[in-house]
Image (spheres, grey):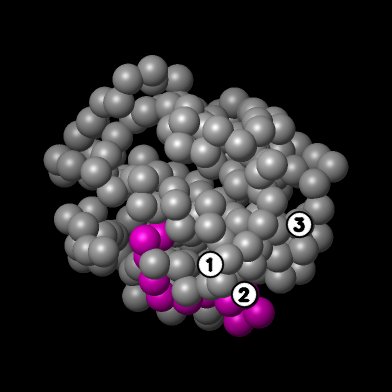
Amino acid sequence: MQTNQLELWRSAFGREYTDRNDQEKPERVVSWRRLLDGVTPKRALEIGCNVGWNLEYLRRIGVEDLYGIEPQTYAVTRARARNPVFNVLHGTAFELPFRDQFFDLAFTSGVLIHISPDAIGAALDEIYRVSRRYIVAIEYGMAHQSEQEVLYRGKQSALWKRDHGAIWQRRYPDLKLVRMLELGVADGYDDCTAQLFEKA
């Protein structure tokens, strides 16, 4: 599946995003530890991993087998250079090159907000398919009951605020909310909600 949003992230706009955001945020290690308290995934996948910082944070809390999918070639190259141990592949949320239930944990962080309303279901279906047990969504705008498009750095059709947790549970009623955290600047995030779901 090709979308206008993927074209945007693969352009100079996406490369500028990568350059602007390639910085360590050690406080996110603490946030991950809080979110996964009592959960010990052995194999995890980040969908939209960019240069791989979340993979690094998970490594620091003991997750050993780490994978990332990223549509932007420039970011994939940088992620592989940062830590060749991470399995970072070029690809999209719409066609994950893994067998069913391959991962203990599959997650997004600031990615679902950039997927259009007509395409988000296809992305959720793939994420659900490859997760054996846990799904995490760390996204902006989850307090919004109704979907709202927001102009993003002068671009239209590039960001939507919505309750991603509710979208997950409407599409997959078997998902149980295990934990929810509100994350702010002190946690290394800009007003995000982190939700940990467990499959039945």
Q: Nearer the viewer, mark 3 or mark 2?
A: 3
Image location (x, y in percent) of residue 33: 76, 44
| Tag 2 and tag 1, C-beta contact below 8 Å | yes
**Residue corresponding to mark 3:** 41
| Picture residue at 44% right of the left edge, 48% below the top | 124
Bounds of the magenta span? Answer: 83-94
Q: Which is more toward the observer, 93 or 61?
A: 93
Residue under the image location 20 percent in, 34 percent down: 151
Q: In this view, does 151 lie to the left or right of 159?
A: left
Secondary element type, mark 2 = loop
- Residue 175 badge: none
Disc number at residue 68? 1
Q: Earlier in the sequence, mark 1 or mark 3?
A: 3
Q: Where is residue 180 in the image (x, y as percent from the top left)?
A: 64, 28
Helix, strand, or loop for circle 1?
Answer: strand
In what element is the residue under mark 3? loop
Q: Which amino acid does label 1 sit on?
A: Gly
Residue 11 located left or right of residue 146: left
Dot 2 crowding, Cα within 10 Å, few <14, some 14–19, many 20+: some
- Residue 88 on the magenta segment: yes
Question: Mark 3 is on which residue type?
Answer: Pro
- How far separated are the C-alphas under marks 2 and 1? 7 Å
Mark 1–mark 3 contact, CB under 8 Å? no
Residue of label 2:
86
Apparent side of residue 19 relative to residue 28 in the rendered image (left or right) = left
The answer to whether residue 129 shows anywhere in this view is: yes
Image coordinates for residue 191, horizontal then vertical, percent: 49, 28
Mark 3 vs mark 2, CA separation in Å:
15 Å
- Give the residue at x 61% y 36%: 174
Q: How many marks?
A: 3
In which quadrant is the C terminus drawn? Answer: top right
